[in-house]
Amino acid sequence: MTFQGFTQADFDVFHIPGLEGRMEGIQGRIQPKFKELGDALVEDTAVLAGDEMFLHIAKHARRTVNAPVDTWMAICHNKRGYKQYPHFQVGLFDDRLFIWLALIYELPHKQAIAESFLKQVDQVRSLIPDDYVVSFDHMKKDAAAVADLGDKEWKAALQRFRDVKKVELLIGQNLPSSSPVLQNGPQFIELVRSTIQTLMPLYLLARSASAA
């Protein structure tokens, strides 16, 4: 099967009540699409990164009561896991899809990455298109428009990312569930590929800071 895109029915999975029913929806409807999408993106991402990359699909294995409000796939250089490393994410809430370069709180080198970004804050800002958004918590829908963040706000955000353990840094795009591009498989793959390409210099900067 080739990736055909996401439909409203995929987003409606998050309105299914209860953990068991919602997980069945995620596993039956969304995860097969993540596999198709990931297979279409991993090789190109590896070429851009200059390193082998692997697909990870969120399993939500630790959940025993509360149903997930979102789900995602990740592309990362580590075969065993992704949360402790810079990685790319594509995922869904009930009303939107997100494409992120994700630097989340599990990163053991979060402070080093933040310092690296702060030292080159002007260059970091120049690499991010104004129509992108930034989030500081992957568990929430809240996202700030890059166009609304000036130099002062960027520095403050990066300092919080450095100093507060739970603060994360996610940079990329959010699309409403009604966006036509989501339903066109080839167009959506190209959009994700283009977003990853745009964010790759920041990914490589984060990887370099992690290894320092």
Image (tube, helix red, strand yellow):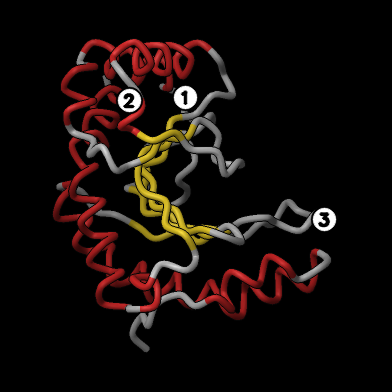
The residue pinned by badge 1 equals: 108
Which residue is drawn at the image coordinates 66% and 56% (left, top)? 60
Instruction: Mark 2 or mark 3: name the one nearer the start of the chain.
Output: 3
As shown in the figure, which amino acid type bears the numbered disc 1?
Pro
The one nearer the camera, 81 or 9, is: 9
Q: Is residue 127 left or right of residue 69?
A: left
The residue pinned by badge 3 equals: 64
Q: Residues within 10 Å of mark 3 (few under 14, many from 20)?
A: few
Which residue is drawn at the image coordinates 67% and 55% (left, top)? 69
Q: Is residue 105 left or right of residue 65?
A: left
As shown in the figure, which amino acid type bears the numbered disc 2?
Ser
Secondary structure, mark 1, is: loop
The residue pinned by badge 2 equals: 210
In percent of width and height, residue 17 lies at 81, 68
Instruction: Mark 1 or mark 3: name the one nearer the start of the chain.
Output: 3
Q: Is residue 147 left or right of residue 142?
A: left
Distance between mark 1 and mark 3 Cα atoms:
27 Å
Pointers 1 and 2 in contact (CB under 8 A)? yes
Q: Residues within 10 Å of mark 1 (few under 14, many from 20)?
A: few
Distance between mark 2 and mark 3 Cα atoms:
33 Å
